[in-house]
Image (cartoon, rainbow, N blue to C red):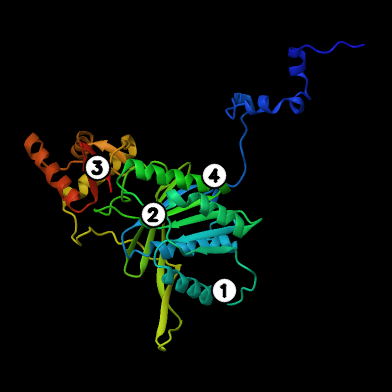
């Protein structure tokens, strides 16, 4: 009779795992160490909308009031739901859950406007699902995940939109604790479906960054800024983890009459269409820059490009800004010839006037000796 294997020999058997006790399996750690030569490149799709929305991942789309950020986001999300390219960009097709936490009547009109404008010949069912109730995301995340699973069944959403953060957060946007809890709730949705989570958010008091604590902007995989100039809407890729930054998408708002109310008055909404508009290169107050300010602006652009560093954690500096010290900026400005004089006081004053002009116009930001292009 063949002797039984020792414990050490038994554990080395290839078919050992099925015989492990439940207790032994429970003790196995989820932490794994993968040797370098076993690390391979994954070729799976990494975007919901190429170059704009990572997949899976967390994206913030932010902007000032009345900038059409919600309308632009709705239009964008319809493209993966339909499997349509967005401005020549590939999409990852699938179900989209749009949580509209404010302006519920408005989103219904936008859906009808989109339907009439773009879906006249569309007969197939579209995997777009509207969630029109206001929620406390931190408290209601588990229920939201459960309802999505129950409603969509075998359809796993590729995106869940939270519009807006303010109307789905019971606490304070400026609180580290409250904002961190909100980010964790958004992460839980992302992890539950391995999807993109898109948060629509408002701007801060000076329009230079998303409102609230930087724990949000520090956690995102992408950050898009929305601005408006009349009927033109510009969306800039401010931050893209492992991707290209700086590109701006131009759209135009068009009014669409979608029906009539019970009094016979027309109901109107709007749609987004592609635009060739260019962002106006003017100062915020409509004035042209002085010669010194132009030289100072060129100098900080060069300084940031050649020696810029990631911004430190701060409530006063945009999370993904590239910063340089005021002194380094000054050196670049001197090298650029900001003053025609070699006198130290004259050069210092010329730089001071140029920098202050850029600060006043909101073109350059500064805090605690650090400067960045706003």
Label 1, secondary structure: give it. loop
Label 4, secondary structure: give it. helix
Does residue 20 appear left or right of residue 170 in this picture?
Answer: right
Using the image, tell me which numbered label, if any, was put on residue 166.
none
Q: Which quadrant of the structure image shows residue 39?
A: top right
Disc 4 versus disc 1: distance between alpha carbons? 32 Å
| Observer-nearest of 239 and 313 | 313
Q: Nearer the viewer, mark 4 or mark 3?
A: 4
Q: Nearer the viewer, mark 1 or mark 3?
A: 1
* Disc 2: which residue: 165
Which of marks 3 and 2 precedes in the sequence?
2
Which of marks 3 and 4 precedes in the sequence?
4
Residue 275, compared with residue 148, is above or below; it is: below
Using the image, tell me which numbered label, if any, was put on residue 299.
3
| Residue at the right extreme of this rendering | 1
Q: Residue at x 31, y 51 (%)?
A: 211
| Observer-nearest of 246 and 52 | 52
How crowded is the residue under tag 1: few (<14 C-alpha within 10 Å), some, or many (20+)? few
**Residue 113 coordinates in the image, percent (x, y):** 48, 75
| Observer-nearest of 21 and 127 | 21
Using the image, tell me which numbered label, if any, was put on residue 191.
4
Residue 42 in sight: yes
**Residue 358 coordinates in the image, percent (x, y):** 19, 49
Which of marks 2 and 4 precedes in the sequence?
2
Which of marks 2 and 1 precedes in the sequence?
1
Disc 1 versus disc 3: distance between alpha carbons? 50 Å
**Residue 280 coordinates in the image, percent (x, y):** 30, 62
Does residue 102 appear left or right of residue 145 in this picture?
Answer: left
How crowded is the residue under tag 4: few (<14 C-alpha within 10 Å), some, or many (20+)? some
């Amino acid at each position: 009779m063949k002797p039984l294997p020792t414990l050490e020999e038994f554990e080395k058997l290839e078919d050992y795992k099925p015989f492990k006790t439940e207790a032994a399996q429970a003790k196995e750690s989820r932490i794994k160490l993968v040797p370098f030569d076993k690390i391979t490149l994954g070729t799976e799709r990494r975007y919901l909308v190429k170059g704009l929305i990572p997949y899976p991942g967390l994206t913030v789309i932010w902007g000032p009031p009345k900038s059409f950020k919600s309308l632009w986001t709705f239009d964008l999300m319809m493209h993966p739901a339909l499997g349509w390219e967005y401005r020549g960009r590939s999409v990852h097709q699938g179900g989209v859950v749009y949580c509209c936490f404010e302006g519920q009547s408005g989103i219904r009109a936008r859906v009808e406007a989109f339907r009439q404008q773009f879906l006249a010949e569309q007969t197939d069912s579209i995997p777009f699902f509207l969630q029109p109730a206001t929620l406390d995301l931190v408290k209601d995340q588990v229920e939201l995940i459960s309802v999505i699973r129950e409603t969509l069944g075998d359809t796993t959403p590729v995106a869940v939109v939270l519009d807006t953060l303010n109307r789905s957060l019971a606490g304070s946007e400026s609180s580290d604790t409250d904002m961190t809890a909100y980010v964790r709730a958004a992460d839980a949705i992302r992890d539950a479906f391995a999807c993109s989570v898109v948060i629509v958010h408002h701007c801060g008091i000076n329009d230079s960054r998303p409102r609230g604590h930087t724990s949000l902007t520090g956690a995102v995989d992408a950050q898009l800024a929305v601005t408006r100039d009349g009927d033109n809407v510009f969306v800039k890729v401010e931050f893209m983890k492992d991707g290209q930054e700086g590109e701006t998408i131009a759209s135009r708002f068009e009014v669409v009459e979608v029906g009539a109310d019970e009094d016979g008055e027309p109901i109107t909404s709007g749609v987004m269409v592609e635009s060739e508009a260019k962002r106006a290169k003017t100062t915020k107050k409509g004035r042209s820059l002085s010669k010194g300010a132009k030289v100072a602006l060129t100098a900080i652009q060069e300084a940031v490009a050649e020696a810029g560093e990631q911004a430190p954690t701060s409530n006063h500096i945009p999370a993904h800004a590239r910063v340089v010290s005021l002194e380094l900026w000054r050196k670049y400005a001197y090298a650029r010839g900001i003053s025609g004089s070699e006198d130290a006081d004259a050069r210092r004053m010329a730089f001071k006037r140029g920098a202050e002009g850029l600060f006043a116009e909101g073109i350059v930001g500064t805090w605690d000796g650090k400067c960045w292009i706003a």
